[in-house]
Image: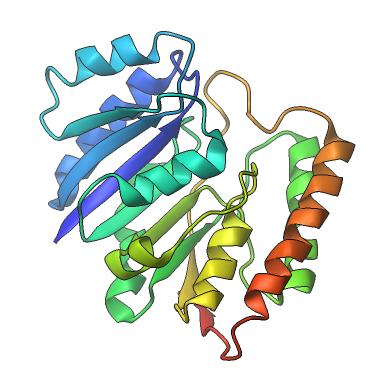
Amino acid sequence: MKVIVSLLSYNEAESIGQTVSEGYQILEKTGLDFELWVFDNHSSDSTPQIMSELQKTLPRLRSYRQSQNVGYAGSTLSSMKVPVGDIYVTLDGDGQFSLADVPKMIVPLSHGFDIVVGWRVQRNDPWDRLIMNWGFNFVSKLILNCKIHDLNCGYRAINKKAANLITVAYKEKFVGPEIFARAIQNGLRVTQTPVAHFERRAGVSVYSGDKLASVLRMLGYLFKLRKVTHQKSEAVLVGSV
């Protein structure tokens, strides 16, 4: 059973080398049949050169560079469609997650779940992002009738069935809600599990910007997804592991 672990990266040259090297060593110790992929969203820094050097010494490391910036949602979709594997684990490549949680993330997939969402129980982010995230999750639960605590967490595990079925139509910074909505649309089973979360090592978050515009865009996005979820009459079984 091949496990594809994908790091999503954009202009993370200051930290991507350390993140990849440490993550690769962790995955080797798990005994999993894995490939570690880095999806470079057309970075303008030295990320491609760093990846080229790392691949000379890490045989199970793969690098995929987008021909243009496809946004966070597009890069997430690529991580589910480009590699060939049985299980797909995707996480942000900014060093705020640990690949040590990969084995824990994939356990529920062997218990009948199709998608596992990470839950940052202790999130290490600036106060403004913590408030934004709390508001986002609160509103998402109301609009989408969702029981997932951290719906937009950038750490997910899905099986091949889900990888084949999930599509991303809305090119937003918020991709977690659409993955959940498509899961409901396709009758997939979703659960969640806690993951460690650390302070950002370097660089600037892609979510920085006009907060009010982000809130308004988020609301419009969620109401579009609500229409998607209402197209399916059966409820997805959502639990916690």
User: Residue at position x 50%, y 41% from top?
Assistant: 74
Check the image and name the residue furthest to the right: 212
The picture places residue 69, in percent across and down from the top left corner, at 51, 26
Q: Nearer the viewer, residue 169 or 33?
A: 169
The picture places residue 12, in percent across and down from the top left corner, at 47, 20
Where is 208 relative to 17, above or below? below
User: Residue at position x 39%, y 22% from top?
Assistant: 16
The picture places residue 153, in percent across and down from the top left corner, at 57, 52
User: Residue at position x 27%, y 75% from top?
Assistant: 110
Q: Does residue 201 appear to the left or right of 104 in the view shown?
A: right
Q: Is residue 206 in view from this perspective?
A: yes
Query: Residue 15 is drawn in which quadrant?
Result: top left
Q: Quadrant of the N terminus?
A: bottom left
Q: Is residue 151 in view from this perspective?
A: no
Q: Quadrant of the C terminus?
A: bottom left
The picture places residue 230, in percent across and down from the top left corner, at 68, 80
Where is 192 relative to 23, above or below? below
Q: Does residue 170 appear to the left or right of 50 in the view shown?
A: right
